[in-house]
Image (spheres, helix red, strand yellow):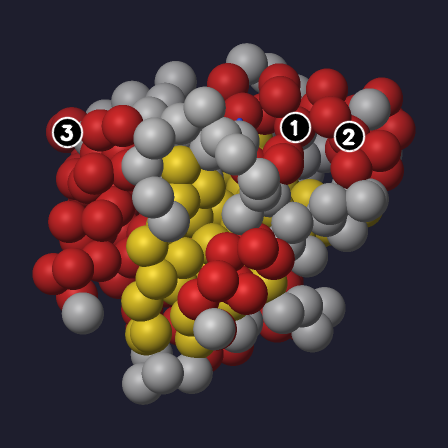
Amino acid sequence: NNRDELMERYSYGKSSKRRCPRYYFINKKKSILIILQGDITRTKVDAIVNAANEHMTGGGGVDGIIHRAAGPELYTACVAHKKITQGVRLPTGHSRILLSYNMSSTTHYIINTAGPVYDRYRKEECAKELLSCYQTSLALANLYDLESIGFTAISCGIFGYPANQGADAALRTVDQEAGIVPVVVFVLWDDDIYDAWVRKAEELE
Ligand code: AR6
């Protein structure tokens, strides 16, 4: 059955995390959206999207985990990108595609995106920037003709974006634009983030 096959392909064996994968058909059934709980570096998708920052020199959170999994060549490839302004290789809301180096058995590409640091006095600008992270990452996956892309909750960790608002930006963008990538997987780590994503997906269904 289609669902079991998808689960086999895009999630990974037994996880210590409890929540089940959920499946949705979106964008007039052109795309499949999968929401699951786990570690994005262990998910077999063509590209994973890293919640990076404007410097693209690695960091904590999922960025640190992805750099450790991909190895030092990822860092070398990141810093090879020319700086646009002082210290900035990747402006907020933009995305860049790189190879996945040591992760190539699970994933071929790593897309770095720079999410906004949440600021409640700049809510609207932050939302635009976050939408743009998802849009530009999907556009790169489409340009490379990829079948599947994996996201985590960009900006919802260290950058402080509230889970519900993060889910809204993520899922509305994916709902509108995902026709260009056949399989979109959200691999979420935290219980509250997973719950917010499932609630939002059900609202949009
Ligand atoms: N798989 C999936 N999701 C994960 C994993 C994982 N292995 N580990 C953590 N998460 P964050 P941000 C979740 O803080 O808010 C870094 O220093 C995490 O629980 O990684 O965009 C960068 O260099 C949270 O829900 O990214 C930047 O400077 C989500 O991933 C800054 O942090 C995003 O949390 C970016 O902050």
Q: Name the spot of residue 152 as percent of width and height, x first.
A: 45, 39
Q: Which residue is mark 1?
A: 66
Up-down: is 144 above or below 79?
below
Q: Do labels 1 and 2 touch, CB within 8 Å?
A: yes
Amino acid type, residue under disc 1 in the picture = Ile
Instruction: Answer with left or right where residue 183 lies relative to residue 79.
Output: left
Mark closer to the chain start, 1 or 3: 1
Disc 1 and disc 2: Cα gap in Å? 6 Å
Disc 2 is placed on an element classified as helix
Q: Residue at x 11, y 61 (%)?
A: 203
Q: Do labels 3 and 2 touch, CB within 8 Å?
A: no
Asked whether mark 2 lies closer than 8 Å to ligand 1, one says no
Determine crowd level at label 1: few under 14, some 14-19, many 20+ residues with C-alpha closer than 10 A. many
Residue furthest top in the image: 60
Observer-nearest of 162 and 8: 8
Determine crowd level at label 2: few under 14, some 14-19, many 20+ residues with C-alpha closer than 10 A. many
Give residue 115's mark.
Answer: none
Q: Which residue is mark 2?
A: 70
Asked whether mark 1 lies closer than 8 Å to ligand 1, one says yes
Disc 1 is placed on an element classified as helix
Disc 1 and disc 3: Cα gap in Å? 31 Å
Disc 3 is placed on an element classified as helix
Amino acid type, residue under disc 2 in the picture = Ala
Q: Which residue is mark 3?
A: 121
